[in-house]
Amino acid sequence: MAMDSELLVRKIRDGTVIDHIPAGNALNVIRILGLPRGRENRMALIMYTSSSKMGLKDIVKVEGLELTADEVNMIALIAPTATINIVRDYKVVRKERVKIPEIIENIIRCANPNCISNQDRETAIPKFRLVSEDPIILRCEYCERHTYKEDILRQFMEGR
Amino acid sequence: MRGRDIISILDLSRDDLYRIFGLAREIEENMDKYINELRGRVLALLFFEPSTRTMYSFQTAMSRLGGSCLVFSDVIRTSIAKGETLGDTIRMFDGYADAIVIRHRIEGAAKYAADIAEAPVINAGDGTHHHPTQAIIDLYTIWKYRGRLEGLNIGVLGDLKYGRASTSFIYGIAMFKPSKLYLISPEELRLKNEVKSDLEKMNIELLETSDLQSVIGELDVLYVTRIQKERFPDPAEYERVRGSYIVDRDLLRNARDSLMVMHPLPRVDEISTDVDDTEYAYYFKQARCGVPVRMALLKLVIKG
């Protein structure tokens, strides 16, 4: 973590620090994680702080939070540079960069309303193949329509 | 090919296609030899969207191979939301039939059916997405009458955005590396980005144009599809463009003698009837290839 952010916000004891979020995207990250969730998860949001790697970046620190695999994948889709730091007793015990999986299943819906995976009564589970990471493009396994970052963001915002 | 699902034309290799073509030609020449080929076999025809030629040609193909068909074309009931789900319908017919042919207005329906069914599933059109058996017929027609598929100058005309027959034809002909591939349509109906990016990966150069007149003289094949009025938000715009996409004798004055004019049919007025008795007209010949090609496909998919 960059020095100046440590000056701004004190360390958390146990929880998760999501670092290296592309600057300006922290609010999207907290929204898709359904944060804030209340006093159990005290949190700090740092935006447009300087980063040696990225120039500017955002950071989200949340006490008492552990992310599920689906939540990590959702972060990967909108903040592909993010790193997830697991903190125990003020120490980072695990640090990993998010990775967009090759196959994305049941996290987002297809942008095509006429796709079989959008028919309520059928059991087709939305499934995508990663076509491109930057810019992010996903291809529906059923109708082959491309889904782009704007579609993904819109869905995450609507769904929370 | 036994047991294979045919959802997109790209599910087939060039070798698969040549195998189908060879058998289709053999069937055309010796139709009677195949009369018991699929005796005792059952084909389910699930048409959730209206069809005449595709459904009847599959039915005819199966009959001529000695097999029988279960025909389900309950369009009215299935358009009511409370009907049985597609998934359940597939599960039921999967227990009855050796292969399933499906047409549905929803994109991805055939792939979904194939995921559920153990029997091979053949896509007979899913929404605006794919129509692989039409493309096999189209390619067979060119192979049969032109003698080859590689290196031709191809023009595809009409609604390239929503037309499933044109999309499948474009993917299919791309496998044979056309010398030039002209995509001729109004701006509003250009090929989908998804298809364009696939073709770029296949190293196919796409030549998009709105001007049929300027390219007609270069073409070996002109594949015509209909431009539907309802695709245009502004009816006046439709009226403005439709005239420039009508194929008639006057346009064909500049064509090569060997040009093949093709159409998946039905046509409305996009090919003038005065073309029908010219040497350019291949669309009725193309339609006649439907049964032998589907016979070959059914034989290979059901029996190998």
Image: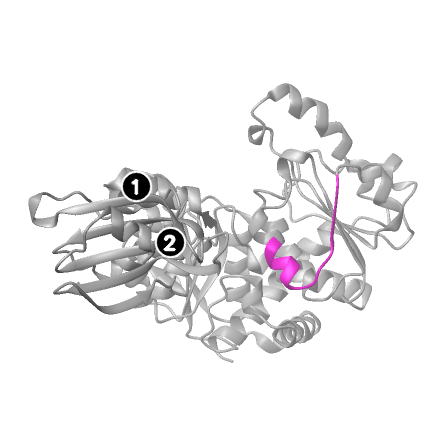
Residue type at mark 2: give it: Leu
Please tell me whether residue B205 belongs to the stretch shown in magenta.
yes
Q: Around disc 1, counting alpha carbons within 10 Å, would you say few (fewer than 14), some (14 to 19), or many (20 or more)?
A: some
Q: To which chain does the residue with label 1 belong? A: A
Residue at 47% in and 73% down? B4
> B217 or B259: nearer the eye?
B217
Q: Position of residue B80 (x, y in %)?
A: 30, 38
Q: Disc 1 marks which residue?
A: A27
* Residue placed most toward the observer, A75 or B276: A75
Seen at 84% across and 44% down, the residue is: B215
Residue B124 is inside the magenta segment: no
Residue B283 pos. (x, y %): 72, 50
Q: How many marks?
A: 2
Residue A38 position, x and y percent, is 10, 43
Q: Tell me the number on the disc at residue B36.
A: none
Q: Chain of mark 2?
A: A
The magenta-colored residue range is: B197-209
Disc 1 marks a residue whose amino acid type is Leu
- Please identify the residue farthest to the bottom as the structure is shown: B304
For label 2, the residue is A77
